[in-house]
Amino acid sequence: MVFSSFNTSPVAGFFDTSVLMEPLLSENAKLVLEKRYLSQDPLGNVVETPKEMFQRVARAVASIEKKEKQKWEKRFFKFMTALKFLPNSPTLMNAGKPHGQLSACYVLPIEDSLDGIFETLKYAAKIHQSGGGTGFSFSRLRSSGSQVKTSRGIASGPVSFMKIYDETTEIIKQGGVRRGANMAVLRIDHPDIFEFINSKRDQKSICNFNISVGATEDFMCALMNDKSFILKEPSTRKAIKEVKATELFDNIVQSAWECGDPGLVFLDRINLFNPTPKCGEIESTNPCGEQPLLPYESCNLGSLNVSAYVKENGFDWDGFYDDIKIAVRFLDNVIDINFFPITKSKKITLKNRKIGLGVMGFADALLLQKIPYDSESAVCFGEKLMSFLDHVAKLASHELAKQKGRFPNWKGSLWDRLGYPYLRNATVSTVAPTGTISMIAGCSSGIEPIFSDIYYKNVLSGEKLLEVHQVGEGWKPAWEVSVESHIKMQAVFQRFSDSAVSKTVNLHERATTEDVKKAYILAYEMGCKGITVYRDKSRLKQVLEMPEVCSNC
Protein backbone atom coordinates (compact mmCIF):
# COMPACT_ATOMS: atom_id res chain seq x y z
CA MET A 1 0.00 0.00 0.00
CA VAL A 2 1.29 3.47 -0.92
CA PHE A 3 -0.08 6.57 0.80
CA SER A 4 -1.65 8.96 -1.70
CA SER A 5 0.31 11.80 -0.11
CA PHE A 6 3.50 10.11 -1.26
CA ASN A 7 2.33 10.04 -4.89
CA THR A 8 4.89 11.94 -6.94
CA SER A 9 3.19 11.80 -10.34
CA PRO A 10 2.83 15.16 -12.08
CA VAL A 11 -0.39 17.11 -11.51
CA ALA A 12 -1.90 20.14 -13.14
CA GLY A 13 0.04 23.29 -12.46
CA PHE A 14 3.33 21.53 -11.75
CA PHE A 15 6.13 20.64 -14.12
CA ASP A 16 6.80 17.09 -15.24
CA THR A 17 10.11 15.87 -13.79
CA SER A 18 9.77 12.38 -15.21
CA VAL A 19 11.97 13.30 -18.17
CA LEU A 20 14.82 14.43 -15.90
CA MET A 21 17.58 12.11 -14.79
CA GLU A 22 18.16 10.81 -11.28
CA PRO A 23 20.76 12.69 -9.22
CA LEU A 24 24.28 11.25 -9.36
CA LEU A 25 24.65 9.61 -5.95
CA SER A 26 27.37 7.50 -4.36
CA GLU A 27 26.55 4.05 -3.00
CA ASN A 28 26.81 5.40 0.56
CA ALA A 29 24.42 8.23 -0.32
CA LYS A 30 21.89 5.77 -1.74
CA LEU A 31 22.12 3.63 1.38
CA VAL A 32 21.64 6.61 3.73
CA LEU A 33 18.66 7.79 1.70
CA GLU A 34 17.03 4.36 1.79
CA LYS A 35 17.58 3.95 5.52
CA ARG A 36 16.56 7.43 6.62
CA TYR A 37 14.99 9.68 4.02
CA LEU A 38 12.91 7.96 1.35
CA SER A 39 9.21 7.44 2.03
CA GLN A 40 8.12 4.02 3.23
CA ASP A 41 4.81 2.21 3.29
CA PRO A 42 3.32 0.92 6.58
CA LEU A 43 5.33 -2.29 6.19
CA GLY A 44 8.62 -0.42 5.94
CA ASN A 45 9.11 -0.88 2.21
CA VAL A 46 10.73 2.02 0.37
CA VAL A 47 8.19 3.53 -2.05
CA GLU A 48 10.17 6.48 -3.35
CA THR A 49 13.26 7.10 -5.45
CA PRO A 50 15.75 9.87 -4.63
CA LYS A 51 14.44 11.87 -7.59
CA GLU A 52 10.89 11.49 -6.31
CA MET A 53 12.02 12.60 -2.86
CA PHE A 54 13.45 15.81 -4.31
CA GLN A 55 10.27 16.29 -6.34
CA ARG A 56 8.14 15.85 -3.20
CA VAL A 57 10.23 18.41 -1.31
CA ALA A 58 10.37 20.91 -4.19
CA ARG A 59 6.62 20.73 -4.71
CA ALA A 60 5.86 21.22 -1.03
CA VAL A 61 8.26 24.14 -0.62
CA ALA A 62 6.98 25.86 -3.77
CA SER A 63 3.34 25.38 -2.76
CA ILE A 64 3.38 28.52 -0.59
CA GLU A 65 4.21 30.75 -3.56
CA LYS A 66 1.22 32.87 -4.61
CA LYS A 67 2.57 33.28 -8.13
CA GLU A 68 4.74 31.12 -10.37
CA LYS A 69 4.51 27.94 -8.29
CA GLN A 70 5.67 25.87 -11.25
CA LYS A 71 8.73 28.07 -11.85
CA TRP A 72 9.86 27.80 -8.23
CA GLU A 73 9.18 24.09 -8.00
CA LYS A 74 11.38 23.55 -11.06
CA ARG A 75 14.15 25.75 -9.65
CA PHE A 76 14.08 24.08 -6.25
CA PHE A 77 14.05 20.62 -7.83
CA LYS A 78 17.00 21.27 -10.17
CA PHE A 79 18.88 22.99 -7.35
CA MET A 80 18.67 19.93 -5.09
CA THR A 81 19.12 17.22 -7.73
CA ALA A 82 22.29 18.96 -8.89
CA LEU A 83 23.44 18.43 -5.27
CA LYS A 84 24.33 22.11 -4.99
CA PHE A 85 22.00 22.69 -2.05
CA LEU A 86 20.28 20.51 0.52
CA PRO A 87 18.01 21.50 3.40
CA ASN A 88 18.27 19.98 6.87
CA SER A 89 17.23 16.36 7.30
CA PRO A 90 13.66 16.84 8.63
CA THR A 91 12.77 18.86 5.53
CA LEU A 92 14.04 16.12 3.21
CA MET A 93 12.26 13.47 5.26
CA ASN A 94 8.93 15.16 5.93
CA ALA A 95 8.14 17.89 3.38
CA GLY A 96 5.00 17.03 1.44
CA LYS A 97 3.78 14.55 4.04
CA PRO A 98 0.89 15.02 6.50
CA HIS A 99 1.97 17.00 9.57
CA GLY A 100 5.45 17.46 8.13
CA GLN A 101 7.74 18.80 10.87
CA LEU A 102 10.58 20.41 8.94
CA SER A 103 12.78 22.21 11.48
CA ALA A 104 16.16 20.81 12.44
CA CYS A 105 16.35 22.40 15.83
CA TYR A 106 14.37 23.75 18.74
CA VAL A 107 15.32 25.27 22.09
CA LEU A 108 12.94 24.65 24.96
CA PRO A 109 12.96 26.40 28.35
CA ILE A 110 12.92 24.41 31.60
CA GLU A 111 11.17 26.13 34.50
CA ASP A 112 12.12 25.38 38.10
CA SER A 113 9.07 23.32 39.00
CA LEU A 114 8.04 19.71 38.63
CA ASP A 115 5.23 20.70 36.26
CA GLY A 116 7.59 22.83 34.19
CA ILE A 117 10.27 20.15 33.96
CA PHE A 118 7.89 17.46 32.74
CA GLU A 119 5.88 19.77 30.50
CA THR A 120 9.10 20.53 28.62
CA LEU A 121 9.93 16.82 28.52
CA LYS A 122 6.58 16.18 26.84
CA TYR A 123 7.32 18.87 24.25
CA ALA A 124 10.78 17.40 23.62
CA ALA A 125 9.29 13.95 23.06
CA LYS A 126 6.95 15.37 20.40
CA ILE A 127 9.82 17.11 18.63
CA HIS A 128 12.04 14.01 18.69
CA GLN A 129 9.21 11.87 17.38
CA SER A 130 8.81 14.25 14.43
CA GLY A 131 12.51 14.35 13.52
CA GLY A 132 13.81 17.48 15.28
CA GLY A 133 16.58 18.03 17.81
CA THR A 134 16.32 19.97 21.06
CA GLY A 135 18.48 22.25 23.14
CA PHE A 136 17.89 23.07 26.79
CA SER A 137 19.32 25.25 29.49
CA PHE A 138 19.10 23.56 32.87
CA SER A 139 20.37 26.72 34.54
CA ARG A 140 17.06 27.78 36.09
CA LEU A 141 16.77 24.59 38.15
CA ARG A 142 17.71 24.91 41.79
CA SER A 143 20.86 23.20 42.98
CA SER A 144 20.98 19.72 44.48
CA GLY A 145 20.42 19.74 48.22
CA SER A 146 18.45 22.99 48.25
CA GLN A 147 15.02 23.04 49.86
CA VAL A 148 11.79 22.57 47.91
CA LYS A 149 9.27 24.64 49.84
CA THR A 150 6.10 23.16 48.35
CA SER A 151 6.95 19.60 49.38
CA ARG A 152 9.46 20.35 52.15
CA GLY A 153 11.79 18.04 50.28
CA ILE A 154 15.30 18.36 48.91
CA ALA A 155 16.02 19.20 45.28
CA SER A 156 17.98 16.64 43.27
CA GLY A 157 19.54 19.18 40.90
CA PRO A 158 19.85 19.62 37.11
CA VAL A 159 21.95 16.53 36.36
CA SER A 160 19.32 14.19 37.82
CA PHE A 161 16.71 15.59 35.43
CA MET A 162 19.13 15.48 32.53
CA LYS A 163 19.27 11.72 33.08
CA ILE A 164 15.46 11.49 32.90
CA TYR A 165 15.47 13.47 29.65
CA ASP A 166 18.21 11.21 28.32
CA GLU A 167 16.26 8.04 29.10
CA THR A 168 13.17 9.44 27.39
CA THR A 169 15.19 10.32 24.32
CA GLU A 170 16.58 6.79 24.21
CA ILE A 171 13.06 5.35 24.14
CA ILE A 172 11.67 7.62 21.42
CA LYS A 173 13.06 7.12 17.95
CA GLN A 174 12.78 10.24 15.80
CA GLY A 175 10.21 9.68 13.09
CA GLY A 176 11.21 6.02 13.07
CA VAL A 177 14.55 6.87 11.47
CA ARG A 178 16.60 9.13 13.76
CA ARG A 179 17.77 8.95 17.34
CA GLY A 180 17.02 12.03 19.38
CA ALA A 181 19.75 14.63 19.70
CA ASN A 182 19.99 17.10 22.58
CA MET A 183 22.12 19.92 23.90
CA ALA A 184 22.31 20.67 27.61
CA VAL A 185 23.74 23.99 28.75
CA LEU A 186 24.44 24.92 32.37
CA ARG A 187 25.65 28.37 33.36
CA ILE A 188 29.14 28.31 34.80
CA ASP A 189 27.98 30.06 37.99
CA HIS A 190 25.46 27.31 38.86
CA PRO A 191 26.29 25.53 42.16
CA ASP A 192 26.07 22.10 40.44
CA ILE A 193 28.55 23.03 37.72
CA PHE A 194 31.23 20.52 38.80
CA GLU A 195 28.72 17.65 38.72
CA PHE A 196 27.58 18.81 35.29
CA ILE A 197 31.13 19.00 33.92
CA ASN A 198 31.86 15.43 35.00
CA SER A 199 28.45 13.96 34.14
CA LYS A 200 29.61 12.18 30.96
CA ARG A 201 33.07 10.99 32.01
CA ASP A 202 31.90 7.40 32.60
CA GLN A 203 30.75 7.29 28.93
CA LYS A 204 27.60 5.47 30.02
CA SER A 205 25.46 8.37 31.23
CA ILE A 206 23.55 11.01 29.30
CA CYS A 207 24.64 9.52 25.96
CA ASN A 208 21.94 11.31 23.93
CA PHE A 209 23.22 14.74 24.93
CA ASN A 210 26.01 17.04 23.96
CA ILE A 211 26.78 19.22 26.95
CA SER A 212 28.24 22.72 27.06
CA VAL A 213 29.17 25.01 29.90
CA GLY A 214 27.62 28.45 29.54
CA ALA A 215 30.67 30.66 30.15
CA THR A 216 30.05 34.28 31.11
CA GLU A 217 32.25 37.35 30.69
CA ASP A 218 32.61 37.49 34.50
CA PHE A 219 34.05 34.00 34.50
CA MET A 220 36.41 34.59 31.58
CA CYS A 221 37.65 37.78 33.24
CA ALA A 222 38.25 35.90 36.50
CA LEU A 223 40.05 33.15 34.60
CA MET A 224 42.33 35.51 32.71
CA ASN A 225 43.23 37.32 35.94
CA ASP A 226 43.54 34.18 38.12
CA LYS A 227 40.73 35.35 40.41
CA SER A 228 38.06 33.61 42.44
CA PHE A 229 34.58 33.07 41.05
CA ILE A 230 31.22 32.94 42.83
CA LEU A 231 28.65 30.17 42.31
CA LYS A 232 25.09 31.40 42.89
CA GLU A 233 21.67 29.86 43.54
CA PRO A 234 19.69 30.40 40.30
CA SER A 235 16.44 31.76 41.75
CA THR A 236 17.81 34.07 44.44
CA ARG A 237 21.27 34.79 42.93
CA LYS A 238 22.55 34.25 46.48
CA ALA A 239 26.25 33.38 46.70
CA ILE A 240 26.67 29.70 47.55
CA LYS A 241 30.35 28.99 47.10
CA GLU A 242 33.58 30.69 46.04
CA VAL A 243 35.96 28.74 43.80
CA LYS A 244 39.13 29.46 41.89
CA ALA A 245 38.30 30.16 38.25
CA THR A 246 41.38 28.18 37.21
CA GLU A 247 40.19 25.15 39.21
CA LEU A 248 36.83 25.23 37.45
CA PHE A 249 38.44 25.68 34.04
CA ASP A 250 40.90 22.84 34.65
CA ASN A 251 37.95 20.54 35.40
CA ILE A 252 36.32 21.49 32.09
CA VAL A 253 39.57 20.90 30.20
CA GLN A 254 40.26 17.55 31.87
CA SER A 255 36.78 16.23 31.15
CA ALA A 256 36.89 17.40 27.54
CA TRP A 257 40.28 15.72 27.11
CA GLU A 258 38.92 12.47 28.54
CA CYS A 259 35.58 12.24 26.70
CA GLY A 260 34.99 15.23 24.40
CA ASP A 261 32.49 16.94 26.75
CA PRO A 262 31.78 19.60 27.80
CA GLY A 263 32.17 22.23 25.14
CA LEU A 264 31.92 25.93 25.89
CA VAL A 265 29.32 28.46 24.76
CA PHE A 266 30.04 32.11 25.45
CA LEU A 267 26.61 33.26 26.60
CA ASP A 268 27.25 36.99 26.92
CA ARG A 269 28.81 37.14 23.46
CA ILE A 270 25.85 35.24 22.01
CA ASN A 271 23.41 37.68 23.60
CA LEU A 272 25.43 40.67 22.46
CA PHE A 273 24.46 39.60 18.92
CA ASN A 274 20.93 38.46 19.83
CA PRO A 275 18.94 39.92 16.90
CA THR A 276 15.71 40.27 18.91
CA PRO A 277 16.70 41.10 22.51
CA LYS A 278 13.21 42.39 23.34
CA CYS A 279 11.93 38.84 22.86
CA GLY A 280 14.15 37.47 25.63
CA GLU A 281 17.57 36.15 26.48
CA ILE A 282 19.26 33.29 24.63
CA GLU A 283 20.12 30.51 27.09
CA SER A 284 20.95 27.55 24.87
CA THR A 285 21.67 26.31 21.36
CA ASN A 286 20.58 23.45 19.15
CA PRO A 287 22.35 20.06 19.58
CA CYS A 288 25.41 20.91 17.46
CA GLY A 289 25.83 24.44 18.78
CA GLU A 290 25.50 26.44 15.56
CA GLN A 291 22.04 27.82 16.29
CA PRO A 292 21.55 29.87 19.47
CA LEU A 293 17.80 30.25 19.90
CA LEU A 294 15.30 31.90 22.21
CA PRO A 295 13.02 29.73 24.35
CA TYR A 296 10.59 27.77 22.11
CA GLU A 297 12.21 29.09 18.93
CA SER A 298 12.97 26.80 15.98
CA CYS A 299 15.14 27.23 12.91
CA ASN A 300 15.39 25.78 9.42
CA LEU A 301 18.84 25.15 8.03
CA GLY A 302 20.28 24.50 4.59
CA SER A 303 23.76 24.27 3.09
CA LEU A 304 25.31 25.08 -0.26
CA ASN A 305 27.89 22.63 -1.61
CA VAL A 306 30.63 25.14 -2.39
CA SER A 307 32.84 22.56 -4.11
CA ALA A 308 30.29 22.56 -6.95
CA TYR A 309 31.23 26.15 -7.79
CA VAL A 310 34.93 25.54 -8.34
CA LYS A 311 35.54 25.65 -12.10
CA GLU A 312 38.67 25.42 -14.25
CA ASN A 313 38.85 29.19 -14.49
CA GLY A 314 38.21 29.80 -10.78
CA PHE A 315 35.30 30.03 -8.37
CA ASP A 316 31.91 30.71 -9.97
CA TRP A 317 30.88 33.74 -7.90
CA ASP A 318 28.04 34.64 -10.28
CA GLY A 319 26.47 31.20 -10.00
CA PHE A 320 27.00 31.23 -6.23
CA TYR A 321 25.25 34.63 -6.05
CA ASP A 322 22.17 33.36 -7.89
CA ASP A 323 21.96 30.15 -5.87
CA ILE A 324 22.25 31.91 -2.51
CA LYS A 325 19.10 33.85 -3.40
CA ILE A 326 17.24 30.68 -4.36
CA ALA A 327 18.33 28.99 -1.11
CA VAL A 328 17.12 31.92 1.02
CA ARG A 329 13.72 31.83 -0.66
CA PHE A 330 13.56 28.05 -0.21
CA LEU A 331 14.31 28.25 3.53
CA ASP A 332 11.91 31.13 4.07
CA ASN A 333 9.14 29.13 2.38
CA VAL A 334 9.86 26.18 4.68
CA ILE A 335 8.83 28.32 7.66
CA ASP A 336 5.35 28.80 6.20
CA ILE A 337 4.67 25.18 5.24
CA ASN A 338 6.11 23.79 8.47
CA PHE A 339 3.97 21.84 10.92
CA PHE A 340 4.88 22.88 14.47
CA PRO A 341 4.21 20.26 17.16
CA ILE A 342 4.18 23.05 19.77
CA THR A 343 1.97 26.14 19.45
CA LYS A 344 4.43 28.38 21.33
CA SER A 345 7.16 27.42 18.86
CA LYS A 346 4.98 28.32 15.91
CA LYS A 347 4.20 31.73 17.40
CA ILE A 348 7.78 32.87 18.04
CA THR A 349 9.23 31.25 14.91
CA LEU A 350 6.76 33.08 12.68
CA LYS A 351 7.54 36.36 14.44
CA ASN A 352 11.32 36.08 13.95
CA ARG A 353 11.46 33.88 10.83
CA LYS A 354 15.06 32.75 11.47
CA ILE A 355 16.80 30.76 8.77
CA GLY A 356 20.35 29.40 8.70
CA LEU A 357 22.09 29.15 5.34
CA GLY A 358 25.61 27.77 5.42
CA VAL A 359 28.13 25.76 3.44
CA MET A 360 29.42 22.24 3.00
CA GLY A 361 32.18 20.89 0.78
CA PHE A 362 34.55 23.63 1.94
CA ALA A 363 37.56 21.30 2.29
CA ASP A 364 36.82 19.89 -1.17
CA ALA A 365 36.70 23.41 -2.60
CA LEU A 366 40.14 24.10 -1.13
CA LEU A 367 41.50 20.84 -2.53
CA LEU A 368 40.20 21.61 -6.00
CA GLN A 369 42.02 24.93 -5.84
CA LYS A 370 45.16 23.30 -4.37
CA ILE A 371 44.92 25.41 -1.21
CA PRO A 372 46.13 23.70 2.02
CA TYR A 373 43.54 23.88 4.82
CA ASP A 374 46.05 25.20 7.37
CA SER A 375 47.24 28.12 5.27
CA GLU A 376 46.54 31.86 5.23
CA SER A 377 45.20 31.42 1.69
CA ALA A 378 42.55 29.03 3.05
CA VAL A 379 41.55 31.51 5.75
CA CYS A 380 41.33 34.31 3.18
CA PHE A 381 39.17 32.16 0.90
CA GLY A 382 36.93 31.22 3.86
CA GLU A 383 36.55 34.89 4.76
CA LYS A 384 35.64 35.88 1.22
CA LEU A 385 33.25 32.94 0.85
CA MET A 386 31.28 33.51 4.05
CA SER A 387 31.20 37.29 3.81
CA PHE A 388 29.85 36.94 0.27
CA LEU A 389 27.22 34.40 1.37
CA ASP A 390 26.09 36.52 4.31
CA HIS A 391 25.89 39.71 2.24
CA VAL A 392 23.92 38.13 -0.61
CA ALA A 393 21.65 36.24 1.80
CA LYS A 394 20.74 39.52 3.52
CA LEU A 395 20.13 41.10 0.14
CA ALA A 396 17.81 38.21 -0.75
CA SER A 397 16.05 38.53 2.61
CA HIS A 398 15.58 42.26 1.96
CA GLU A 399 14.06 41.56 -1.46
CA LEU A 400 11.72 39.01 0.11
CA ALA A 401 10.74 41.57 2.76
CA LYS A 402 9.69 43.96 0.00
CA GLN A 403 7.57 41.20 -1.58
CA LYS A 404 6.17 39.43 1.48
CA GLY A 405 6.83 41.67 4.48
CA ARG A 406 9.55 41.98 7.11
CA PHE A 407 9.72 39.67 10.14
CA PRO A 408 7.11 40.91 12.66
CA ASN A 409 9.57 41.49 15.53
CA TRP A 410 11.61 43.93 13.42
CA LYS A 411 11.02 46.98 15.62
CA GLY A 412 13.76 47.24 18.23
CA SER A 413 15.70 44.37 16.69
CA LEU A 414 19.47 44.47 16.22
CA TRP A 415 18.98 45.18 12.51
CA ASP A 416 16.53 48.00 13.23
CA ARG A 417 19.01 49.61 15.64
CA LEU A 418 21.85 49.26 13.12
CA GLY A 419 19.78 50.96 10.43
CA TYR A 420 19.52 47.97 8.09
CA PRO A 421 16.91 47.97 5.34
CA TYR A 422 14.01 45.69 6.22
CA LEU A 423 14.78 41.98 6.34
CA ARG A 424 12.40 39.05 6.01
CA ASN A 425 14.43 36.98 8.49
CA ALA A 426 16.00 37.79 11.88
CA THR A 427 18.98 35.58 10.98
CA VAL A 428 20.08 34.31 7.58
CA SER A 429 23.50 32.69 8.01
CA THR A 430 25.00 29.87 10.04
CA VAL A 431 27.45 26.99 9.58
CA ALA A 432 25.96 23.57 10.35
CA PRO A 433 27.85 20.23 10.59
CA THR A 434 25.96 18.74 7.58
CA GLY A 435 26.64 15.18 8.74
CA THR A 436 24.40 13.06 6.51
CA ILE A 437 23.36 15.68 3.96
CA SER A 438 27.01 16.13 2.94
CA MET A 439 27.13 12.36 2.38
CA ILE A 440 24.11 12.67 0.10
CA ALA A 441 25.76 15.57 -1.74
CA GLY A 442 29.03 13.61 -1.98
CA CYS A 443 31.19 16.30 -0.41
CA SER A 444 33.13 17.06 2.77
CA SER A 445 31.12 18.11 5.81
CA GLY A 446 30.58 21.73 6.82
CA ILE A 447 33.85 23.65 7.05
CA GLU A 448 35.78 20.72 8.53
CA PRO A 449 39.08 19.55 7.08
CA ILE A 450 38.96 16.08 5.56
CA PHE A 451 39.19 13.57 8.40
CA SER A 452 41.49 11.19 6.51
CA ASP A 453 42.01 9.68 3.09
CA ILE A 454 40.12 6.59 4.29
CA TYR A 455 37.83 6.32 7.31
CA TYR A 456 34.56 4.92 8.61
CA LYS A 457 31.40 6.93 9.29
CA ASN A 458 29.15 5.50 11.98
CA VAL A 459 25.92 7.30 11.12
CA LEU A 460 23.61 4.31 10.71
CA SER A 461 22.79 2.00 13.61
CA GLY A 462 25.12 -0.99 13.51
CA GLU A 463 26.52 -0.19 10.06
CA LYS A 464 29.90 1.32 9.21
CA LEU A 465 30.19 3.26 5.98
CA LEU A 466 33.64 3.36 4.42
CA GLU A 467 34.59 6.78 3.04
CA VAL A 468 37.54 7.18 0.68
CA HIS A 469 38.87 10.65 -0.08
CA GLN A 470 41.71 11.88 -2.25
CA VAL A 471 43.39 14.30 0.16
CA GLY A 472 45.99 15.54 -2.32
CA GLU A 473 49.72 16.10 -2.05
CA GLY A 474 50.73 18.05 1.06
CA TRP A 475 47.29 17.94 2.50
CA LYS A 476 46.88 17.16 6.24
CA PRO A 477 44.12 15.04 7.84
CA ALA A 478 41.98 16.78 10.49
CA TRP A 479 44.00 15.78 13.55
CA GLU A 480 47.26 17.02 12.01
CA VAL A 481 45.84 20.51 11.46
CA SER A 482 47.09 22.73 14.28
CA VAL A 483 44.80 24.02 17.00
CA GLU A 484 45.51 27.56 15.80
CA SER A 485 44.45 26.73 12.23
CA HIS A 486 41.23 25.08 13.39
CA ILE A 487 40.26 28.09 15.50
CA LYS A 488 41.32 30.67 12.90
CA MET A 489 39.04 29.01 10.37
CA GLN A 490 36.12 28.86 12.79
CA ALA A 491 36.62 32.49 13.79
CA VAL A 492 36.65 33.81 10.24
CA PHE A 493 33.39 32.02 9.43
CA GLN A 494 31.91 33.22 12.73
CA ARG A 495 32.66 36.82 11.80
CA PHE A 496 30.13 36.58 8.96
CA SER A 497 27.53 34.28 10.53
CA ASP A 498 24.42 35.71 12.18
CA SER A 499 24.11 32.61 14.33
CA ALA A 500 27.14 30.44 15.15
CA VAL A 501 29.49 27.85 13.67
CA SER A 502 29.48 24.10 14.21
CA LYS A 503 33.15 23.11 14.19
CA THR A 504 35.07 20.38 15.97
CA VAL A 505 38.73 20.85 16.79
CA ASN A 506 39.87 17.31 16.08
CA LEU A 507 43.00 16.41 18.04
CA HIS A 508 45.37 13.47 17.78
CA GLU A 509 44.96 10.89 20.54
CA ARG A 510 48.38 11.95 21.84
CA ALA A 511 47.17 15.54 22.35
CA THR A 512 47.54 16.93 25.87
CA THR A 513 45.24 18.88 28.17
CA GLU A 514 47.34 21.92 27.28
CA ASP A 515 46.17 21.54 23.67
CA VAL A 516 42.55 21.52 24.84
CA LYS A 517 43.17 24.54 27.06
CA LYS A 518 44.79 26.40 24.16
CA ALA A 519 41.77 25.71 21.92
CA TYR A 520 39.28 27.04 24.48
CA ILE A 521 41.26 30.21 25.18
CA LEU A 522 41.92 30.92 21.50
CA ALA A 523 38.24 30.45 20.67
CA TYR A 524 37.33 33.08 23.25
CA GLU A 525 40.06 35.48 22.19
CA MET A 526 39.25 35.18 18.47
CA GLY A 527 35.55 35.95 18.85
CA CYS A 528 33.93 32.50 18.51
CA LYS A 529 30.53 31.94 20.14
CA GLY A 530 31.36 28.42 21.23
CA ILE A 531 33.96 25.68 20.97
CA THR A 532 34.03 21.88 20.80
CA VAL A 533 37.20 19.79 21.08
CA TYR A 534 37.49 16.09 20.41
CA ARG A 535 40.61 13.98 20.99
CA ASP A 536 40.71 10.88 18.79
CA LYS A 537 39.77 7.65 20.58
CA SER A 538 38.69 9.48 23.74
CA ARG A 539 35.29 7.80 23.44
CA LEU A 540 34.46 4.12 23.15
CA LYS A 541 32.22 4.97 20.18
CA GLN A 542 32.83 7.82 17.77
CA VAL A 543 31.21 8.98 14.54
CA LEU A 544 34.42 9.07 12.50
CA GLU A 545 37.13 6.47 12.97
CA MET A 546 40.18 5.14 11.20
CA PRO A 547 40.22 1.52 9.98
CA GLU A 548 42.33 -0.86 12.03
CA VAL A 549 45.68 -1.25 10.27
CA CYS A 550 47.40 -4.62 10.30
CA SER A 551 50.67 -4.41 12.23
CA ASN A 552 52.35 -6.77 9.72
CA CYS A 553 51.34 -4.71 6.67
Image: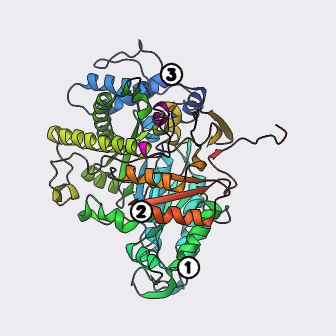
Residue drawn at point x = 56 percent, y = 39 percent = 475
Residue 532 position within the rendered picture, expressed as x and y whole percent measured from the top left? 52, 58
Residue drawn at point x = 26 percent, y = 58 percent = 275
Of callouts 1 and 3, which one flags the residue occurring earlier in the amino acid sequence? 3
Label 3, residues with CA under 10 Å away: few <14, some 14-19, many ≥20: some
Q: Give whichever of 254, 156 is nearer the camera.
A: 254
Quadrant in which the C terminus appears: top right
Q: Is residue 394 left or right of residue 402?
A: right
Question: How much space separates mark 1 and mark 3, taking CA atoms?
Answer: 53 Å
Question: What colouring does the structure picture have?
Answer: rainbow
Q: Give whichever of 149, 495 is nearer the camera.
A: 495
Of callouts 1 and 2, which one flags the residue occurring earlier in the amino acid sequence? 1
Residue 177 position within the rendered picture, expressed as x and y whole percent measured from the top left? 56, 41
- Element type where label 2 sits in the image: strand
Of callouts 3 and 2, which one flags the residue occurring earlier in the amino acid sequence? 3
Residue 466 position within the rendered picture, expressed as x and y whole percent measured from the top left? 66, 35
Asked whether the residues under the numbered discs 1 and 2 touch, taking CB atoms below 8 Å apart as contact, a structural biologist would say: no
- Element type where label 1 sits in the image: helix
Residue 280's place in the image compared with 50, above or below, is below
Q: Is residue 84 magenta?
A: no
The residue identified by callout 1 is: 247
Q: Which mark is residue 24?
A: 3
Question: How much space separates mark 3 and mark 2, taking CA atoms?
Answer: 38 Å
The reply to whether residue 156 is in sight is no
Over which residues does the magenta segment extend? 365-377
Mark 2 residue type = Ser
Asked whether the residues under the numbered discs 3 and 2 touch, taking CB atoms below 8 Å apart as contact, a structural biologist would say: no
Quadrant in which the N terminus appears: top right
Residue drawn at point x = 81 percent, y = 40 percent = 550
Residue 498 position within the rendered picture, expressed as x and y whole percent measured from the top left? 32, 52
